[in-house]
Image (cartoon, rainbow, N blue to C red):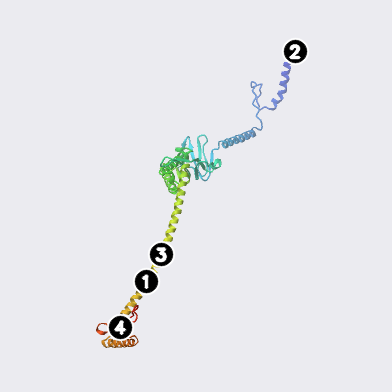
Amino acid sequence: MPIDLNEHLKRKNEQRNNDESPKKNDKNDKPNPSKNGGFRPPNIPQNLLTNKKITGLIAIIIIVLIILLAKPFVVINSGEVGIKVTAGKYDTTPLQPGIHFFVPIIQDIIIVDTRVRTINFSRTEDMGVVGKNQGIFRNDAINVMDSRGLTVSIELTVQYRLNPQTAPQTIATYGLSWEQKIINPVVRDVVRSVVGRYPAEELPTKRNEIASLISSDISKEITKFPNSPVELSSVQLREIVLPQNIKEQIEKVQIARQESERVRYEVDRSKQEAQKAAALAKGEADANRIRAQGVADAIIIEAKAKSQANKSIAQSLSDKLLQLKQIETQGKFNEALKENKDAQIFLTPGGAVPNIWVDSKSKQKNTATTGK
């Protein structure tokens, strides 16, 4: 059996050599493996170049995907600025709106909003996620103590914006939560300082004065920060929440003030009516005075006229005229004696008129007549 196996192997090798010999004769330019110690060159496929192109294309696609995933660029919109950070160091020059590239892993670009933002210091109001996305935030209302130690709650709204020119320095100094480190503490300190100067019951009546002081003082404190990190737009005092006992006291004061105003109005109206009556009385008195003056002037004029007449009469009298008058009067007496013989006549001294006539017939009644 071993002999047969060896013979079989020998025949098989001879047959294989016979099968390979024609191929070797056809290709003379190729080395013979039997002559070169059995070396055979590698079999190179015909589509090798095509495979290289596909491989290169795949490599390019992979590189593009890596770039897209790494995203070595950012787009900055209007109302924003970019801050380039290289190995942890902030570039002091802000990046303006547009597309900007950076080296991944080594560099990064932080985008910050420079539009107007709002903080509402309120007890209940909350804008939620929508408000935060629009730059509207809520902080708790500011509890302060008045000049007498009573607690008062102040609600107000502050509008501001990050200074785009100094944004890199601001973010490097205060971080992305810069507004809670600048705006919030400044507003609270100023409100406590201003409101603490007044008693609680005076706060509603001096609201405008307090609002003006809060706004001006906040603006002054913000400007004290280096590099001017914030631009303040407006400060609006929204509400002053007083303690309940102060509210009741103010209501009582207001009621008393209203009553006082009503009484004052009544007093003023009474004064006006009295002034009108006094004016009417004065007018009537003036009219009476004018009338009395007219009467007095008339009497004076009449007296002057009589005096002038008497003077004229006195100047016109003469002795002959008097004697004529006496004769006429004596004649009248003589006529009267004819009818009443009991009558008595008393002559004035000198026998001049007037004479006195006495009727002695009646004992109960005597009649005296003066001659003219």
Q: Quadrant of residue 41?
A: top right
At numbered mark 4, what does the secondary structure look like: helix, strand or loop?
A: strand
Q: Can residue 16 be seen in this view?
A: yes
Residue 292, numbered label: 1
Residue indicated by mark 4: 344
Q: Earlier in the sequence, mark 4 or mark 1?
A: 1
At numbered mark 1, what does the secondary structure look like: helix, strand or loop?
A: helix
Q: Position of residue 218 (x, y in %)?
A: 43, 44
Residue indicated by mark 3: 279
- Disc 3 to disc 4, C-alpha distance: 66 Å
Residue indicated by mark 2: 4
Q: Where is residue 257 in the image (x, y as percent from the top left)?
A: 45, 50
Q: Which residue is drawn at 43% across and 57% down?
A: 268
The amino acid type of the residue labelled 1 equals Ala
Image quarter of the N terminus: top right
Q: Earlier in the sequence, mark 1 or mark 3?
A: 3
At numbered mark 2, what does the secondary structure look like: helix, strand or loop?
A: helix
Frontmost residue, 361 versus 217: 361
